[in-house]
Image (cartoon, helix red, strand yellow):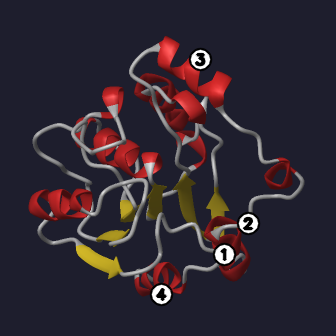
Amino acid sequence: MKKQIVIIHGGGTFATYEDYLNFLRSYEINIERYKTDKDDWKPWVRRMLQENYEVITPHMPNKTNARYEEWKLWFEKFFPYINDGVILIGHSQGGIFLAKYLSENQFPKRIGGVMLISAPYDKDSEGYPVLSFSLPAILNLQTNNTFLYHSKDDPVVPFEALEQYQKLLPNAVARVFEDRKHINQEEFPELLKDILSLR
C-alpha cells in the first residue's frame, strides 16, 4: 500500500462580507494567469513521489474568503480515505488550518508528520487577518515529526509567524529561506527531502 500525503492549499479571509465584496469589485484580472494551470510545488511533489505515495489535494471551500468551520467540515469528509501514517502538509492558510484543527480535534489516524509552509500565526499578523482560523494558546499537532518552512522575504505572511510557531512547537524542525517569498516555486526539494526522511 502506498503511503499518503494530504496537502491543504492556501487561501484568504476577510473581516466582513462587505470587505470581501470590495475586494472582488477592485480586483484587477491578469488574463495570462488564467490561460495556464498554476504550476507550483504541489503538482511537482505529486510527480516526484507518485511511485510510492498517494498525494491527495482537497480543494477547500471558498478559498478566497475562507471560513474555518467550512474547511473543517470538508476536511473531515476525507477521513474515510486516509490511512495511518499520513503526512499532512499545509501551505499558508492551509498551514494555520492544520495547526488549529489538530490542536482542537483528535485526528482519527496516526499522523506520520506535519509540515507547515508559510503559515500565518494569529490575527495580529500584519496584513493577513486569520479571523475564524485564530489558534488556541497551546498547539498539539499529534506527531513528533513537525517541520516549519518560511522565507524571510515573504510578502504575504510576516516572518515573525515562524518565530511564534517555534515558541509553541520547540521540537519542530525549522527551514528558513532568504529568497523564496511565499514559497510558490515550481520545485521544493527541501520539502521532498523531509518527506522522504519520514520513511
Q: From the viewer's perspective, tell me whether residue 42 is left or right of residue 107.
A: right
Amino acid bearing label 2: Asp
For mark 1, give the secondary structure: loop
Q: From the viewer's perspective, tell me whether residue 115 is left or right of residue 162.
A: right
Earlier sequence position, callout 4 versus callout 3: 3
Q: From the viewer's perspective, tell me whether residue 73 is left or right of residue 126.
A: right
Which residue lies at the image location 52% right of the left edge and 37% below the top edge? 75
Earlier sequence position, callout 4 versus callout 2: 2
Where residue 116 sits: x, y (%)?
Answer: 37, 61
Please tell me whether mark 4 or mark 1 is closer to you in this view: 1
Amino acid bearing label 4: Lys
For mark 2, give the secondary structure: loop
Residue 179 seen in the current view: yes
Earlier sequence position, callout 3 versus callout 2: 3
Q: How many marks?
A: 4
Could you classify mark 2 by the number of other residues whose Cα lies within 10 Å: few (under 14), some (14-19), or many (20 or more)?
Answer: few
State the mark number for residue 186. 1
Which residue lies at the image location 47% right of the left edge and 61% below the top edge? 86
Residue position marked by numbered label 2 in the rendering: 39
Examine the rendered structure and indicate whether residue 190 appears above or below residue 79: below
Could you classify mark 1 by the number of other residues whose Cα lies within 10 Å: few (under 14), some (14-19), or many (20 or more)?
Answer: some
Residue position marked by numbered label 4 in the rendering: 193
State the mark number for residue 21. 3
Using the numbered discs, state the Cα–Cα distance from disc 4 to disc 1 in whole angstroms. 15 Å
